[in-house]
């Protein structure tokens, strides 16, 4: 599988890291889009290897510190007819306002139009912060993750991947 650089024309979001591996220009077959935040950027090299081993062309759009709304904006800007599966690793930056997440989940599911969506749940614990901040992180992590589980109960094509625990 060849790796080419740069996003499709007109699709770059400021500060985004985009990795194309034949995703949007691949011939018919399995294609995936991976969108997310800093955790996604840190997994890029491992994902390159795993997706190549599986023979799945993909593209990635990830940016550190990005909450779900701009992450979903980046996703829905892509041509839908060229996306067969979606991986979302976003929500960690929504712990400060977790109740915005249901709308963003609904936007992803509307865009997916029945295609499989794999959403990785979150875990935030700023261990160097005071106890009350850590408790708030844990409480809001639980809220984000429960919102994802509830959404999966409503959408048969949504799978929540539990990396938290």
Image (cartoon, rainbow, N blue to C red):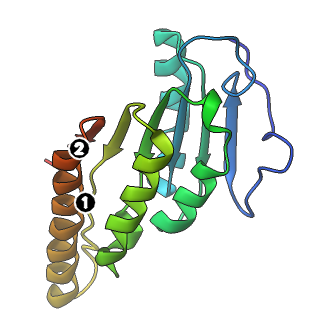
Name the residue at the right extreme.
Answer: 9
112 w.r.t. 30: above or below: below
**Residue at the spot 59% in from the left edge and 60% down from the top edge:** 73
User: Residue 5 at what x, y percent from top left?
Assistant: 80, 33
Instruction: Tell me the element at label 2.
Output: loop
Q: Please give the count of numbered marks on the rendered protein.
A: 2
In terms of secondary structure, where does tag 1 sit? loop
Residue at the image point whose x is 28% and y is 57% from the top: 122
First in residue order: circle 1 vs circle 2: 1
Q: Are marks 1 and 2 in contact (CB under 8 Å)?
A: yes
* Residue 15 to residue 29: above or below: below
Residue 147 x, y percent position in the rendering: 21, 62
Q: Position of residue 74 (x, y in %)?
A: 62, 54
Residue 111 visible in image: yes
Sort mark 1 into few (<14), some (14-19) or many (20+) by Cα contacts within 10 Å: many
Query: Residue 65, can we see it?
Result: no
Which mark identifies residue 123?
Answer: 1
Please, is residue 56 above or below residue 150 in the view?
above
Question: Residue placed at 19% from the left, 79% from the top?
Answer: 134
Measured Cα–Cα span from mark 1 to mark 2: 8 Å
75 left or right, relative to 47: right
Quadrant in which the N terminus appears: top right
- Residue carrying label 2: 163
Specify whether 148 is left or right of 80.
Answer: left
Q: 38 or 142, which is in the foreground?
A: 142
């Amino acid at each position: 599988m060849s790796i080419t650089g740069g996003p499709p024309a007109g699709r770059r979001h400021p500060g985004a890291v985009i990795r194309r591996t034949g995703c949007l220009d691949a011939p018919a077959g399995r294609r995936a889009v991976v969108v997310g935040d800093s955790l996604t950027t840190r997994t890029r090299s491992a994902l390159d290897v795993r997706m190549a081993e599986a023979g799945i062309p993909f593209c990635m759009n990830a940016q550190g510190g990005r909450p779900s709304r701009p992450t979903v904006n980046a996703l829905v800007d892509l041509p839908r007819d060229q996306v067969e599966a979606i991986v979302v690793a976003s929500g960690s930056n929504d712990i400060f306002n977790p109740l915005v997440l249901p709308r963003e989940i609904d936007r992803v599911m509307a865009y997916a139009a029945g295609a499989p969506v794999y959403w990785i749940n979150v875990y935030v614990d700023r261990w160097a912060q005071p106890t009350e901040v850590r408790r708030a992180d844990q409480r809001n992590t639980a809220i984000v993750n429960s919102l994802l589980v509830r959404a999966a109960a409503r959408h048969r094509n949504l799978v929540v991947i539990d990396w938290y625990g």
